[in-house]
Amino acid sequence: MFETRSALASVMPAAGRDGAAGGRRLRLGEAELGSLTQIGIYPGGAAMVAAPAAAVLGGALPESTVAVSRLGEHLALRIAADQYWIRSHSAGLTARLRASLPDHAASVTSLDGARSCIVIEGAAARGLLGQLVAVDVDPAVFGVGHFAQVPIHHVGGLLHRAQALRYEFIALRTFAASTFEVIEDAARYYGYDLLDEHQEKGKS
Amino acid sequence: MSGARLAAGGRIDRSRPLAFRFETRRLTGYAGDTLASALLAAGVRLFGRSFKYHRPRSVVAAGPEEPNALLTLGVGGRRTPNIPATTTELYEGLVCERQNGWPSVDFDLLTVNSWIGALLSAGFYYKTFMGPRRGSWMFYEPFIRRAAGLGRADHLPDPDRYHTRHAFTDVLVIGAGPAGLSAAVAAGRAGARVLLVEQDFELGGSLLSAPVAGPEEQVRRALLAELESLPRVEVLRRTTALGLYDGRFAALLERHEHASPDPALGAPREVLVGVRARAIVYATGAIEQPLLFGDNDRPGVMLAGAVRAYLHRHALLLGRRAVIATNNDSAWATALDLAAAGAEVTLLDERPAASAGLAERARRGGVEVRHSSRLLRAIGALRGVEWLEGESHSRRRTPCELLGVSGGWSPALHLSSHTGARPAYDAALGCFVPGPFPAGVFGAGSVMGRHAGPWADGHQAGESAARNAGASGSAGDAVRPSWEAWPGGAALSPRNPPRRGGKAFVDFQNDVTTDDLALAHEEGYEAVEHAKRYTTLGMGTDQGKISNLNAARLLAGLRGIEIQDAGTTTYRPPYTPVSIGALAGRSVGRHFRPIRRTPLHDWHLANGAVMTEAGPWLRPWYYRWAGADAGSAYLAEMRQVREQVGLSDVSSLGKIDVQGPDAAEFLDRVYVNGFAKLPIGKARYGVMLNDDATVLDDGTTARFGETRYFMTTTTAHAADVMSWLEFLLQTAWCDLRVQVVSVTDAWAGMSVAGPRARAALELALPEVSLADAALPHMAVREFEIAGVPVRILRLSFSGELAYEVYVPADRGVAMWTRILERAAPLGIRPYGLEALASLRIEKGHVAGLELDQRNTLDDLGLGKLASRTKAYVGRELRERPELTDPERWSLVGLECLEPAARLRGGAILFARDETPAGHGRGYITSVTWSTVRGKPIALGLYRGGLRHAGEEIVCAYPLLGETVRARIVSPMFYDPAGERLHV
């Protein structure tokens, strides 16, 4: 009934292209983000939230502010001292969190649809990211599972190293098309194929 | 000069000829040539005309310190003036031309400037062109501007791409001469991540000026091979370090034009690199300085080290009859090598004796040596030199076609000074050396004034830098040649030059002579910074690399002080000129700045919307269904809303999720009016102030649950409000149990407005009751349709019955089209920003143009909104006398009294009987044509506000010389009682 529409629909190229030296050393595209929920803990509320959150998520909320915690089918990121993102493909997670976490201890906010997930993958991924983010993406520094909140072209987002040569940039939806255009422009030098992991959420 | 390419030798690759175009001539050089060496090999001697006097000029140096050989490269959009030929790597297809001659450099009529040189001394434009009356300068200025400058750029768009890159490293080594190479190897061996940058296209620095078959070349190759083998060492050639900044951040410029990059394939012409390093090693070397004597700018006069560089690197013997004049040992190497190549050489040394062993080497090499001898002047272009010999100062002449001069070496310490370390004068060395380095910064080699033993010096610096960066491996031993050729020996301190006629140039590029400096001193510009700006010394593209030191000496001498007391000017980035393209990087054209699109953006484009910029957003300005241009379309759209129903995209409004047990208290504190008792299911208009009591923003906040609120802000101030709320929670009210989350991107919002709005939504959303009793004015509902959350807020900005509908952003198009399709029988149409703004003006709502953070609640007619009982941000400072002055301006409505006239935003308001001049009594903030009044109307701010209701005033627009009569009325032009909202 209410079909979903990607923020990148109109800017995604029809096809990949070769780079300056020939060949294609990247894959670009959009990934299905799933649901994105922000948990905010009020002053003094951490102790009251820990157990119910762990029960819903299947593991404790992360302490690290640089590494993603994989909790079963969920990814948990500590984006601030008192704030967490839970990324998941599990239906109804936001509602379960809202029902489980005491509302005098924490807030639960759905960010579904508020972000777009841009994928940069391939041998030249780090070279491309070097043009876009002021973060040291040397593998010895930015390991698999690490994330950093950084801007691309003046707009903040979250960069996650999902795999050895796969990076995901979670961009603000309203800026996502503009951000992708900048990424694609920078990727032309390396040449790229297109990924298409984004699937419609389905007709309701 | 004469001479030609030698048949053998040099570092050029004769198997790779490269064709290029020099003005109308097609020439050939070789891989490994610079443009300067290729032109010299082709017999070109005149490289341009000087800036002011249009004197003939030729190559002086072999590196970025070159002041004369500035050419224009490229054609069309790639045309780039003022490029040193000495640092331009020759490539196939290069196009170049000389500069600053009219009609040509070869035949330049502007040499007349040389004849009137006395009128063109330093600061002449402050004197010569000041009369005959005040304002005369504005007459002369265009002519002076036209005559000024060297090359000319084109106005065509630049077709090339420029990239930006962020780099991180443990040890940044700047310069790949012997010290730099050694430092990089040492740091790399120790396990550090190393970035070695070199501005040249070959690595080696001063080693490239040495014989190819010498022992130092073997060490150079060994170090290069080892660098390649070290896994964590990255080498960037053709990369200039432009500037050093705090935190060991360096700006580098990578050049790629030698590869003829194709922008269509994404290849950049230049890359600006920002490097963050844990440690830095300066190995930037030293720059040879010229001597001062009469007509020292003649073609054929060069730096002695450059002569040697062209000989050994490019196999060019630039003169068969050469004189070398020096005050230090280094130029002896040039003299010896020229003689070995077959030239007849006379060496004039200002000192009574040189270092041990050099005299014997000169004798064996057939070099005639004269000690205690000083140059007096160059003769012709170039036919010989006149000089003074010995203590008797006997005047001598020697014929020559090449004159190599060396006045000592000045460390290239510019980068080290960028972060504020003032250079210090070393009297023993006769030059300035870098000031104290901060932690993590090291220097090696001749940049430190240490010319001997650069290998070991660099090795030690690299090892220290690696340790500082946390590397713990062994750096091993320094690699060095079996013997080091640098002659050593300090330079004789230069004295003021003897002259016999002719100009003695201190700054070649800007035509600044010793007489100019004396004049500046005489006129009171004694300080080196003043003298610089008065004479323009050091202000050219070479930034005084071969003039600053001589100037400092001269000025110290004129003032009778020590040179260290005279000091240097302040070195600032960039070290060499950088193109605007490189600084812009990718932020050009469509990428000039980020663009923000609503979830409905693509639909608008596909359905006839003409977009406009609203901050970073693109929003529909108007739709083509309503008219062919904005001026007609918005009126049709206004009527659509006033008479039927319209649909507008309000997704750009700021939206903030406010949650927590203390959320009500929090809102009570940030808004001037009360929110603590807002019922669930209701929304309220609120205004928030800055802590100085000016209005920050307005908006509506809805309560969806006991602890859940949904705040909307203006589009323009969404980020400001979010930052403000976070600031308050993190610093002022840390104990409040509140979380705020920006959800602007999470929700698509659309406004259904007009007398048929309810009917339209009932067709679109039969799932929910929209009857007045179920959803009265300012009520809100949230529900789901097939699992999709939907929020409806009954709010109006237009003055008509209206609803704002919110769905998750990725469902926005689906909801929008559903409303349009299902409500089509009612004639629903989309309307844009222009109509939206005009409707609210009719209603008297303040918006961005009034909320400019200078105005108070009372200024905007909102004073009654403020609570008298609760505390809120800005409450106390509202009571400041200047903010409660009844004569402050406040919001009024304006009706135009002249049928054919128009009111303009920004027009200044005057009382009817006042002369419309000066600041007036206020100004117009917003204007529109009113479809309900049938005339232009406006909102404005007028001193005394509505106390002047009914009065006729004048709206002046001085930019167009307009004055229009208007009447002050209530700002609520439409439905002041709000009856249309409560149907």
Image (tube, coloured by chain):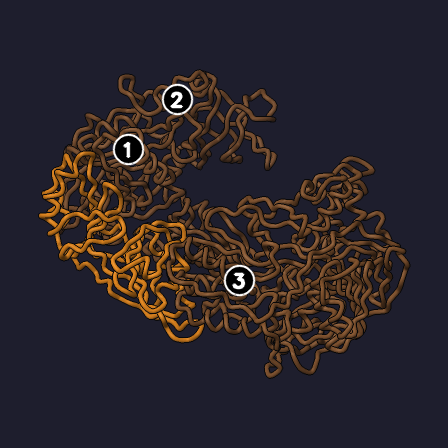
| Residue drawn at point x = 69 percent, y = 66 percent | B306
Tell me the brown chain. B
Q: Is residue B503 left or right of residue B70?
A: right
Can you say which quadrant of the picture contains the N terminus of chain B? bottom right
Q: Position of residue B268 (x, y in %)?
A: 49, 65
Q: Residues within 10 Å of mark 1 (few under 14, many from 20)?
A: some
Secondary structure beneath dot 3 equals: helix
> Marks 3 and 2, how far apart in space?
75 Å
Q: Position of residue B526 (x, y in %)?
A: 73, 39
> Upstream in the sequence, badge 3 or badge 2?
3
Q: Which mark is residue B87?
A: none
Label 1: which residue? B729
> Upstream in the sequence, badge 1 or badge 2?
1
Closest to the observer, A127 or B109: A127
**Chain under numbered label 3:** B
Outermost residue on the front side: it is B356
Label 3: which residue? B456
Q: Position of residue B484 (x, y in %)?
A: 61, 68
| Residue drawn at point x = 33 percent, y = 29 percent | B688
> Upstream in the sequence, badge 1 or badge 3?
3
Q: Which mark is residue B858?
A: 2
Between circles 1 and 3, the one closer to the viewer is 3
Say if labels 1 and 2 share a chain. Answer: yes
**Res. B669 visible in picture:** yes
Q: Residues within 10 Å of mark 3 (few under 14, many from 20)?
A: many
Under mark 3, the amino acid is Ala
**Chain under numbered label 1:** B
Can you say which quadrant of the picture contains the C terminus of chain B? top left
Against B914, is B566 above or below?
A: below
Q: Is residue B469 left or right of residue A169?
A: right
Q: Residues within 10 Å of mark 2 (few under 14, many from 20)?
A: many
Tell me the orange chain. A
